[in-house]
Amino acid sequence: MMNLTYKQKGAEIIEFVLILPFLLFILFGIMEFGIVLYDKAIITNASREGARSGVAFKCPLLTTAQIQAVVNNYSTGLVSFASTKAVPVITVIPAPPSTITNCGANSGTPLKVTVSYSYQFLVFGNLFGLLVPGFSNPLILSATTVMNYE
């Protein structure tokens, strides 16, 4: 009678080697897309904070540069795997007036703050570029907030 455990020796290692790439794919996928969602949440909140600071009743109103500074301060925690640190692109439309007189003249008109950020993938950028038509690495994340002046 033959010993069956002798023929099964090393089978666990072969099974592990076959399963390991799928486990790593899932692990890195969870990590990388978690970071993408984290960055998206940061730029969404940064655009909201910039718009809120811009429309709050003050005399004089914040300038475009001051609103951009608020957004930049809020978005310091962005994560990207690019070789150079990517900075968000911030647009404020329309540009707030810079005069002190007639401070309430903009009341009820909208202020639009848009934040765009270029996220560089670590592992999946080139892979998805091959599998998904139209996918680009880096991925452009964007958030827009529109609020009315108080």
Image: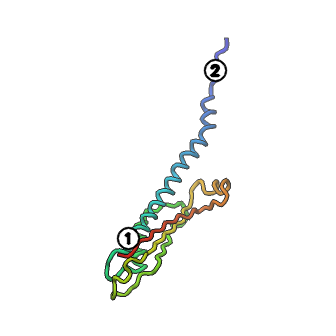
Q: Which residue is mark 2?
A: 6
| Quadrant of the drawing holding the N terminus | top right
Q: How is the image coloured?
A: rainbow
Q: Which residue is mark 1?
A: 52
Nearer the viewer's eye, disc 2 or disc 1? 1
CB within 8 Å, label 2 to label 1: no
113 shown above or below 100: above
Q: Is residue 95 left or right of residue 104?
A: right
**Mark 2 nearby-residue class (10 Å; few <14, some 14–19, many ≥20):** few
Label 2 is placed on what type of residue?
A: Tyr
| Front residue (pair 136, 2) | 136
Label 1 is placed on what type of residue?
A: Arg
| Quadrant of the drawing holding the C terminus | bottom left
Q: Which of the numbered marks, if any, corresponds to residue 36?
A: none
| Front residue (pair 116, 8) | 116
Residue at x 41%, y 71% (from the top left corner): 147
Question: Which residue is situated farthest in the front direction here?
Answer: 108
Horizontal and vertical percent for residue 110? 43, 75
50 shown above or below 41: below
Horizontal and vertical percent for residue 121? 57, 58
Horizontal and vertical percent for residue 40? 48, 60
SS under mark 2: helix
CA distance for labels 2 and 1: 71 Å
Q: Is residue 34 left or right of residue 147?
A: right
**Mark 1 nearby-residue class (10 Å; few <14, some 14–19, many ≥20):** many
Among the two numbered marks 2 and 1 on one chain, the one whose residue lies closer to the N terminus: 2
59 shown above or below 133: below
Residue at x 48%, y 75% (from the top left corner): 91
| Front residue (pair 49, 56) | 56
| Residue 70 found in image quarter | bottom left
Residue at x 57%, y 42% (from the top left corner): 23
